[in-house]
Amino acid sequence: MSRLDTRFSALREAGRTALIPYLTAGDPRPEATVGFMHALVAAGADVIEVGVPFTDPMADGPVIQAACERALVHGTSLSQVLDMVAEFRRDDGDTPVVLMGYLNPIDRLGLAGFAERAAAVGVDGVLIVDMTAEETPEIMPTLNAHGLDAVCLIAPTTSESRMARICENAGGFVYYVSFKGVTGSSSLDVSSLGGQIERIRGYSRLPVAVGFGVRTAANAADVARVADAVVVGSTLVRCIADGGDDLAATREALGTTLAGMRSAIDAQDSNNREERRA
Amino acid sequence: MATIDPQHAADPATLAQAWREMPDARGHFGPYGGRFVAETLMAPLEELAAAYESARNDPAFIAALDADMADYVGRPTPIYHAERLSKKAGGAQIWFKREDLNHTGAHKINNTIGQALLADRMGKTRIIAETGAGQHGVATATVAARLGLECVIFMGSEDMRRQATNVYRMRLLGAEVRPVESGSRTLKDAMNEALRDWVANVDDTFYIIGTVAGPHPYPAMVRDFQAVIGRESRRQMLERCDRLPDAIVACVGGGSNAIGLFHPFLDDESVEIYGVEAGGDGVATGRHAAPLSAGRSGVLHGNRTYLMQDDNGQISATHSVSAGLDYPGVGPEHSWLKDIGRAHYVAVDDQDALAAFHECTRIEGIMPALESAHAVAYAQKLAATMAPDRIVLVNMSGRGDKDMASVAEAAGESL
């Protein structure tokens, strides 16, 4: 059983919603990332999503684009990101880590070599934003062959036939993009979320995570009413941007922000459990 | 699926067949092209591909396009024998295909007319586009004004500085020009922003990509709209000279004017094809915009193609005196034509392009766009190696009026 499967089944058993923070590796400096990851775990992260910086992150909004630029000033490469995960794993063998990024850096490193190294350092899942099931049929089997889960995006616009195809090879969890737009750009419309998640559950038994647009603890609690996991990205990346060079203060700010979301989700989870009992 | 193995592509009959069938149903030119986008864009791209397929098979759409090309754009554009430039080069006869005489001053409008008609047919009310030199932005703002569509143009702030006149033209035409401050603040970043806007506004918005790059169906669709350049040129050469040219030359940034000229000549084995990339400070310096000359295969902006990138797969900053060529990628069909050897890709540096600009202006009275000046410079070199009874046809893809500030700056003068 993969680390992601273990984590999600334990959460399901306990009736809890997963909290998945995102940060861009190397932002604001490469040496900051591992400390930030531990701080996020301490504040209640169940899974960590680590962004691989790319010069042209076309599905991301200005907040994450700026984070990529800060990381790239220091030359943060995919290879270094894998080293960061290895370092994180020395002190944390349980928290699943998902890499999120764009295809070109992986393409340059070579897919098979990347998958082998990622698995060896303790990466659990990989989400390649600009990879589609049609375009690169070899990617998912290669990731799976190395024991990596291929985390896939589903959008409000995804057709039924594509959804079936995507879910067929997906692993770990399904990442539902909560609205038409880029990361961090607008706030969430929770009214249609329940129906969309039900639509996905018709195709996949994987947990459904919702991201793009979760800004506040209240947003996180709203999502926790219907989804299995809540992804928080731009809000945390903004903490890192505001923290500048004071890494200790940033660690604290990340912890406080995430902990606020954690308690809102926990409160919602306990309501959910009561509703179910009733 | 029409896949081509470059190793087995030597048979001309097979090749001729292959390039007529390219791309395959999913937008591949051999190993290049395709559709590498976030899931959110898959549905709108499928909708666009279906709408384009239906439009291009609809005689009413084609008739409307042809009428606009004639009455609004001013087609056909002439071919012109540049006699003094030919004499100066001292070899083959140099002819220009005068795309600079199109309405708005460049080939870009061939494509924007087509895509705007398609947008209208699809019921979209808002148009967005990216622009580098501003020619595509102006051509887009122009057709949006004519059809009464809302128009937003994304332009890198560095390019806005270099092309201030075109920014003003777009605003006069009623378009909003949104400065892009991310990354290198040039064409590639403008394209990122336009893609982001499109994701957020797909319901009412049509994205008019200005070159033969981007996810399928853009490379094929833009090529089809631009192929009028090559179709006219071929017919005009036969009418005027009773023969085809021996070589055709065009500048390549994303490569839309080049593919428009090249495509109708691909079957003509006697015609050598040359694409001219921006050599910037010189390809050896690394400060250039010549992915086919010095790049590697990768994935950017929705397609696989040759890219300027570093060893970590990060996209490199580009450099060219010409904003329209300042792009780290290139249309996937060019990548394929390079690999199979049907077209040659070369680079001309800033200095030689500027020299060709001045020479063409002074001895032909035709002021080329700095982009087109790259093609003129290479044509002069090429012609010098050929006999006087040979013909080199150059695509004069745009006029140079927009480049006054850049030319003056390069000469150390201020306007």
Image: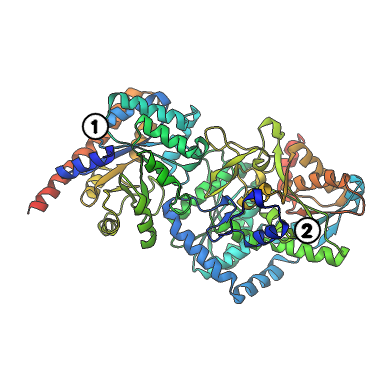
Q: Residue at x 50, y 68 (%)?
A: B122
Query: Which residue has dot 1 on it?
Result: A43
Q: Is residue A179 visible?
A: no
User: Height in image: A239 above or below A278?
Assistant: above
Query: Is A228 left, or right, of B208 in this rendering?
Result: left
Name the quadrant containing residue B67.
bottom right
Q: CA distance from mark 2 to mark 1?
A: 66 Å
Query: Is A203 left, or right, of B302 in this rendering?
Result: left
In which chain is the residue bearing label 2? Answer: B
Q: Amino acid at mark 2?
A: Arg
Front position in the image: A17 or A181: A17
In which chain is the residue bearing label 1? Answer: A
The mark tally for this picture is: 2
User: Height in image: A201 above or below B281?
Assistant: below
Query: Callout 2 environment at 10 Å: few (<14), some (14 to 19), or many (20+)?
Result: many
Q: Residue at x 26, y 32 (%)?
A: A94
Q: Secondary structure at mark 1?
A: loop
Q: Amino acid at mark 1?
A: Ala
User: Height in image: B359 above or below A87?
Assistant: below
User: The N terminus of chain B lies in which quarter of the figure?
Assistant: bottom right
Q: Residue A251 appears at what percent x and percent y?
A: 31, 27
Query: Callout 1 environment at 10 Å: few (<14), some (14 to 19), or many (20+)?
Result: many
Q: Residue at x 36, y 23 (%)?
A: A246
Tell whether label 1 touches label 2 (CB within 8 Å): no
Query: Is B144 left, or right, of B239 in this rendering?
Result: left
Please give the label number shown on residue B106. Answer: none
Q: Residue A252 appears at what percent x and percent y?
A: 28, 27
Front position in the image: B24 or A44: B24
Q: Residue B268 appears at what percent x and percent y?
A: 77, 59
Q: Residue A73 appears at what percent x and percent y?
A: 50, 29
Please give the label number shown on residue B98. Answer: 2
